[in-house]
């Protein structure tokens, strides 16, 4: 076997849990083969470069072998080789996540609940204004 569908290869290489998840991401334009957006039926061969975007991270791998059978993880890792730039970007992203979360993500969004409104009313007491005069 010298070529296989990209959705089958991504599934066999264990980048996606199911073939349908791989097909969805391919259809959404999150997967490129040799710099070109593809359809799930696109065939990949050894030597092709596959770029996958998940969340804010782009992972670039070179196809070393093709298989349409999903095997154990150590065998699946032999199907591809990740580029040095991709490894470096992944390590930088992991370091950023380790350093801390975005402060804006910790803010509570939306309408206050009934309990929140009662807390606000208790904090203000009977005053109807924020002014200093009583």
Image (cartoon, rainbow, N blue to C red):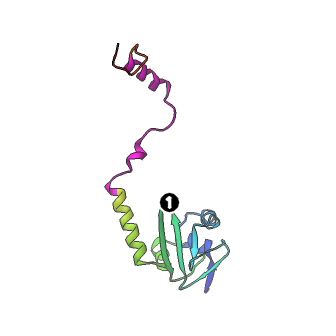
Q: For the point 37% across and 72% down, which residue is it?
A: 88
Q: Which residue ends up furthest to the left in the rendered image?
A: 99
Q: Nearer the viewer, residue 104 or 8?
A: 104
As drawn, is 42 to the left or to the right of 53?
right
Against 105, is 50 above or below?
Answer: below
Q: Nearer the viewer, residue 116 or 82?
A: 116
Q: Main secondary structure of the magenta part?
A: helix
> Circle 1: is it few (<14), some (14-19), or many (20+) Cα within 10 Å?
few
Instruction: Tell me the element at label 1.
Output: loop
Task: Tell me where residue 71 appears, x and y as whole percent.
Answer: 53, 73
Q: For the point 49% across and 24% down, which residue is it?
A: 114
Against 92, is 61 above or below?
Answer: below
**Residue at mark 1:** 55
Q: Nearer the viewer, residue 68 or 84?
A: 84
Position of the C terminus by quadrant: top left
Task: Tell me where residue 108 appears, x and y as whole percent.
Answer: 45, 38
Splitting the image into 4 quarters, where does residue 35 fall? bottom right
Task: Tell me where residue 9 appears, x and y as whole percent.
Answer: 58, 75
As drawn, is 10 to the left or to the right of 125?
right
Against 109, is 62 above or below?
Answer: below
Q: Is residue 121 magenta?
A: yes
| Total number of numbered discs in the rendering | 1
Against 29, is 66 above or below?
Answer: below
Q: Is residue 9 magenta?
A: no
Task: Tell me where residue 72 appears, x and y as whole percent.
Answer: 49, 71
As drawn, is 25 to the left or to the right of 105?
right
In magenta, the rendered stretch is: 98-124
Q: For the point 40% across and 72% down, which residue is it?
A: 87
Position of the N terminus by quadrant: bottom right
Q: Nearer the viewer, residue 93 or 79?
A: 93
């Amino acid at each position: 076997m010298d070529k296989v569908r990209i959705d089958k290869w991504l599934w066999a290489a264990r980048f996606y849990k199911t073939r349908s998840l791989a097909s969805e991401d391919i259809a959404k334009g999150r997967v490129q083969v040799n710099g070109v957006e593809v359809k799930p039926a696109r065939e990949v061969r050894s030597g092709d470069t596959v770029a996958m975007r998940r969340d804010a991270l782009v992972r670039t791998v070179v196809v070393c072998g093709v298989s349409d059978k999903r095997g154990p993880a150590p065998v699946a890792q032999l199907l591809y080789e990740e580029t040095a730039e991709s490894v470096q970007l992944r390590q930088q992203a992991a370091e950023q996540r380790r350093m801390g979360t975005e402060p804006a993500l910790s803010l509570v969004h939306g309408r206050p609940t009934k309990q929140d409104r009662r807390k606000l009313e208790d904090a203000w007491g009977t005053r109807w204004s924020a002014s200093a005069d009583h």
